[in-house]
Image (cartoon, rainbow, N blue to C red):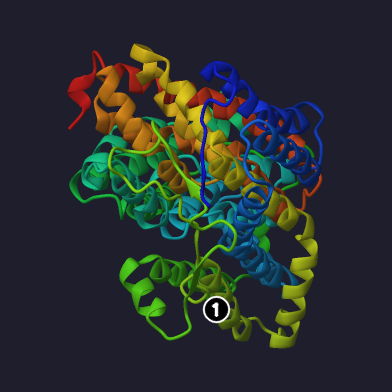
């Protein structure tokens, strides 16, 4: 017999929301105050979530356990599959010695750490987000920056902050497409509104990264590069989101920003090269380096970008999924069909069944594209064999054992909160803000991404509620749905899932708390900007909406 969700278990929406927030508060406390290791913080939050789900929300124990396992399975695939393969490709380039040539080539382009961060974390990372998403850009770019000599904390933090600009249009526009499906609003309309919000953030992210690293005064020394990267990306993001749709803004913006930076660096160099304290010049210009060696060294990442691009195309995914045995799909045992949603979460005349489908699309998964790119790259690495690559793969899994555990627990926690109704309880509390809802609407997206690590999942969770609430309080419904996605991008950098990916890529396992504290102020500041902009667009600046 199906169990029906309850959203106000103690008879007070406010106190029910406070109880639902206890596991999240504990997670914040463990990471930000105690600076606990990620898997320990996640374990405490999971235990508290189980206690609340069983004792307060009265969820059946078996259903609660299976919802946790269901989320953990999603953590293993596709998220961990992407992280493991991405770090594996990086590890192979290091073991084969090819990454040294990548470092030298980048140093010849620019030895300035500020420009390297803009080039790799912002521009190249945005391309990876646009093609694959789901942890791929942070895993790859953070590992690359560490290989270049960045301090692990700065490499991870810079990549997390840089990853805000492209998230809403990541994975060929999947978050916006899902928002449209859930809310019933055209994804073209949502993309256009997001394209009139997010560029205000995108244009300042390159400056934000530089100030984060070296302060405002030293950042002004590379103002031409900051302007080129920010204007190229933000302008392209606006144009493609408003005149093409949700699928290409990230990819085209990243390519245009990369091209702009390369063109600029051919005619301009900063007067003073900035490095971290204690660093010495790389002397890359004195090292013989021919073009064929550079092309060979970069080839794993060129192949990776091409493979990830094709794997991200919906048409190509359909072809791969059509191959017999390429997709294993089933309803999760002990959960699928055993939970019903209720009002106000359940739309009128909608099916109350909270389905739990699990799809193992092993061939069309982003991690598989990265795996194949790694295998194709091995013959291009001099003196490196497939046996070396296989050994490196298993060493990578051992290296990532704690992040794997952390990510699985965090996704299990998120799904337990979703299926128990605790996430909806928190969402309903935000809807009680009435006429101030436009100011708080992005916070729902921020909360959803913090819980799940995914703007897509956040949109699936809250966009229906965003539309219905907006219609009640008199806010434009399409703006509320778009704000959910824009608010979500600023929560990505502090999501425990993202933190775990970043610490795994930079070999900072056990320092998740330090990275969380590093990213938290930036997340809050950017979220406030999105909240204010949404409130203004719902009122005096409503002329900005399409």
x then y, percent, for residue 213: 63, 33
Task: From this view, report whether residue 522 is shown above or below residue 63.
Answer: above
Q: Secondary structure at mark 1?
A: helix
Front-most of residues 127 and 120: 127
Residue 397 locus on image (x, y percent): 75, 67
Vertically, is 129 above or below 414? below
Residue 37, by quadrant, is top right
Q: Tell me which corner region of the image, top left, top right, bottom left or bottom right, holds residue 60.
A: top right
Q: Residue at x 42, y 56 (%)?
A: 171
Residue situated in front as seen by the camera: 509 or 124? 509
Please tell me which residue is depicted at 37% across the width and 53% down the height of the picture: 174
Q: Is residue 29 above or below residue 434?
A: below
Judge from the rendering whether residue 471 lies leftward or rightward of residue 215; answer left or right.
Answer: left
Query: Can you give x and y, in whole percent of width and height, for residue 533 in the image?
Result: 35, 21
Residue 166 appears in the figure: no
Percent across and percent down for residue 245 are 24, 50
Compared across the picture, whether 114 is left or right of 538 comes to: right
For label 1, the residue is 372
Q: Residue furthest front?
A: 1
Q: Vertical placement of 314 versus 70: above or below?
A: below
* Screen quadrant of the C terminus: top left
Name the one closer to the observer, 415 or 6: 6
From the viewer's perspective, is 408 left or right of 433?
right
Q: Nearer the viewer, residue 146 or 88?
A: 88
Quadrant of res 255:
bottom left
Report the label total.
Answer: 1
Q: Is residue 457 visible?
A: yes
Tell me if mark 1 has few (under 14), some (14-19) or many (20+) residues whose alpha carbon lies within 10 angstroms of its own: some
């Amino acid at each position: 017999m199906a169990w029906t969700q309850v959203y106000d278990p103690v008879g007070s929406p406010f106190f029910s929301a406070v109880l639902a927030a206890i596991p999240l508060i504990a997670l914040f406390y463990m990471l930000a105050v105690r600076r606990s290791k990620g898997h320990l913080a996640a374990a405490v939050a999971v235990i508290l979530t189980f206690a609340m789900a069983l004792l307060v929300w009265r969820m059946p124990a078996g259903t609660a356990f299976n919802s946790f396992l269901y989320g953990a399975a999603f953590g293993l695939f596709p998220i961990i599959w992407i992280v493991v393969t991405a770090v594996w490709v990086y590890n192979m380039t290091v073991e084969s010695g090819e990454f040294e040539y990548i470092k030298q080539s980048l140093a010849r382009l620019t030895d300035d750490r500020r420009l390297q961060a803009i080039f790799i974390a912002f521009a190249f990372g945005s391309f990876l987000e646009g093609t694959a998403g789901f942890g791929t850009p942070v895993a790859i770019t953070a590992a690359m920056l560490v290989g270049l000599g960045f301090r692990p904390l700065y490499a991870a933090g810079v990549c997390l902050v840089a990853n805000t600009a492209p998230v809403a249009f990541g994975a060929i526009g999947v978050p916006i497409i899902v928002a449209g499906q859930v809310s019933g609003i055209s994804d073209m309309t949502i993309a256009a509104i997001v394209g009139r919000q997010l560029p205000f953030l995108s244009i300042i992210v390159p400056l934000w990264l530089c100030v984060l690293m070296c302060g405002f005064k030293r950042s002004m020394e590379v103002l031409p590069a900051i302007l080129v990267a920010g204007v190229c990306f933000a302008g392209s993001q606006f144009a493609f989101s408003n005149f093409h749709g949700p699928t290409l803004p990230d990819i085209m913006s990243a390519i245009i920003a990369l091209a702009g930076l390369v063109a600029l660096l051919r005619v301009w160099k900063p007067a003073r090269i900035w490095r971290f304290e204690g660093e010495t010049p790389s002397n890359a210009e004195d090292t013989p380096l021919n073009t064929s060696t550079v092309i060979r060294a970069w080839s794993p990442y060129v192949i990776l970008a091409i493979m990830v691009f094709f794997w991200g195309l919906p048409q190509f995914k359909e072809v791969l999924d059509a191959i017999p045995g390429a997709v294993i799909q089933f309803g999760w045992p002990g959960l699928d069909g055993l939970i019903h949603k209720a009002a106000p979460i359940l739309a009128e005349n909608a099916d109350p069944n909270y389905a739990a489908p699990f799809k193992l699309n092993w061939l069309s998964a982003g991690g598989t594209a990265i795996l194949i790119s790694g295998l194709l790259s091995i013959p291009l690495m001099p003196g490196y064999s497939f046996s070396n690559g296989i050994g490196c793969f298993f060493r990578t899994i051992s290296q990532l054992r704690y992040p794997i555990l952390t990510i699985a627990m965090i996704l299990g926690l998120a799904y337990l909160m979703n299926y128990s109704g605790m996430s909806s309880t928190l969402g309903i509390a935000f809807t009680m803000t009435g006429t101030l809802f436009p100011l708080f609407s992005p916070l729902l997206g921020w909360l959803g991404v913090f819980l799940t690590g995914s703007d897509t999942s956040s949109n699936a969770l809250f966009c229906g509620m965003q539309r219905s609430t907006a219609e009640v309080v008199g806010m434009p419904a399409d703006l509320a749905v778009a704000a959910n996605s824009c608010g979500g991008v600023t929560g990505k950098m502090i999501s425990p899932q993202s933190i775990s990916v970043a610490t795994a890529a930079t070999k900072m396992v056990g320092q998740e708390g330090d990275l969380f504290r590093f990213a938290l102020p930036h997340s809050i500041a950017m979220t406030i900007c999105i909240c204010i902009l949404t409130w203004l667009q719902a009122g005096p600046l409503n002329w900005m909406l399409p």
